[in-house]
Amino acid sequence: MGVEGRTYRPVVDHDICGACAVCLHGCPAERIPEMRSEPESLRGRIYGHEDPFALPLVDSPAAIPPCRAACPLGQDIPGYVGLLAQGLVREALERIHEHNPLPSVCGHICTRPCEAACTRTRLNDPVPIRALKAFASQRGGAGPVQVGALEDNRPSVAIVGSGPAGLTAAHDLARRGIRCLVLESHDRPGGMPAWAVPRFRLPPEALERDIQGILGLGVELRTNVRFGFDVTLEDLHEQGIRAVLLATGTVKGLSLDIPGENSQGVMDGLAFLRGVNSGDHRVPGGHVLVVGGGNTAMDAARTVRRLGGEATVIYRRGPGQMPAGSAEVREAEQEGVMFCFLTAPLRIIAGEDGRMKGLLCIRTELRRTEQDKRPKPFPLSGTEYEIAGDALIPAVGQVPDLTPLVKGLGLKDSARFRLDPASLETGYSGVFAAGDLLTGPTSVVEAMAGGRRAARAIRDYLQGEASE
């Protein structure tokens, strides 16, 4: 906190104040309405607005700052921001690593719930927490160092999937002395950030820096190993694995389920992004239509622009309802991506050669019902119209691919595959699930929080097993 001056009437140094509001929570003057109007205090700056807000009063002066409370990982944001303000970059990175094993990744693609909760938004702009994390990860030196000795020379936990959830679980377990084996079906680790996030949003070297820090803890990584095909649960048990974490994410894109999706020029959003990240830089078409309003849709449209094509995003709701981050939407507009809001696709129009040449759409309007918290789009009869385009990228959602998991667990079909979001258990003793596989598509930081929960569950399981 940047508080100076007399103890009974503190004055805030606005140049270093992070607006965490801890001073307000714990200050006795908060209970004196007259003191809220002092213009040079943070209280005066806040309550002096036309639309003042009141922070809840608490008995303890050690209230959690709003930014930290909003972070799924519970990072000590005021702590490391304060260290950076003092020029202690290495110390700031160490503070970050206490809760976050992927600071470089989060410094580039975190959805920034902390900034949305920052008290300073009531005054002007939030503290640029994500950018500060990126700075610390770039300038703070090497990653985390080994803490304690690993309990065995052989892995006792296998983690299937090396995305944010799997890597976080491996990090947390390794720091507790538990050796982990991470299995990745692709040729490089990182999960969706490695193959589905464009490099202009997440440079490969940033992801690599975080991964090397985790591997430095003694975590073993094997790439090009497909669970269910190259190795099964039975195989892992024979290798001495005592617990398994399934963290394979949501890797299959949903179809639009409209006529004409088998036309030439239609490509799944995740498959398109994976191809580009693997070196295929061919533009899908001269004018590419992207259906969806999430970050995958924004990434696909912006990638098309970088490859030299025109891109139009079609979304059935309005701009205020887009799940994509506001910064990604704004940057897409600045890069020349066009938008058609309140529009839903009906049918793909193809020529005699089977090549797509347009998309038949219909206008929609949003209506709120008692059952739905979010307004739903309803088609408006008689408003059908065609949008010209020679390629289409659906990006309307993602689901897990259960086939390898079913095979790896020895099941006959996916109907018997059960996941418990509360306990993270799968119905198999010692087999847990985490991340997007368990919850559906979320943000990187939410998936990491899921990996942390799984690490605790696995640790408890191993301790219980040892005590039997």
Image (tube, grey):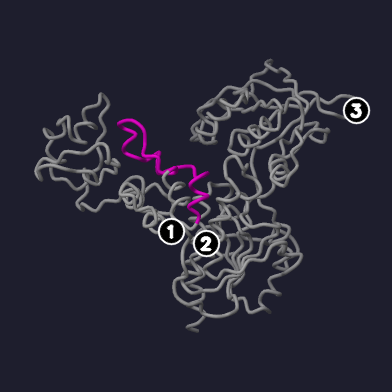
The residue at which mark 3 appears reads as 353
129 in magenta: yes
Image quadrant of residue 181?
bottom right
Crowding at label 3, few (<14), some or many (≥20) Cα neighbours within 10 Å? Answer: few
Tell me if residue 106 comes above or below residue 183 in the rendering: above
Residue drawn at (57%, 65%) of the image: 432
Residue drawn at (12%, 42%) of the image: 5
The residue at which mark 1 appears reads as 97
The residue at which mark 2 appears reads as 213
Decide which of 398, 155 is in the foreground and name it: 155
Amino acid type, mark 3: Asp
Residues under numbered marks 2 and 1 in contact, where contact means CB atoms less than 8 Å apart: yes
Tell me if residue 210 comes above or below residue 51 in the rendering: below
x, y percent for residue 63: 26, 51
- Closer to the eye: label 2 or 3: 2
x, y percent for residue 200: 60, 39
Amino acid type, mark 2: Gly
Sequence-wise, which precedes: disc 2 or disc 1? 1
- The magenta segment is 102-131
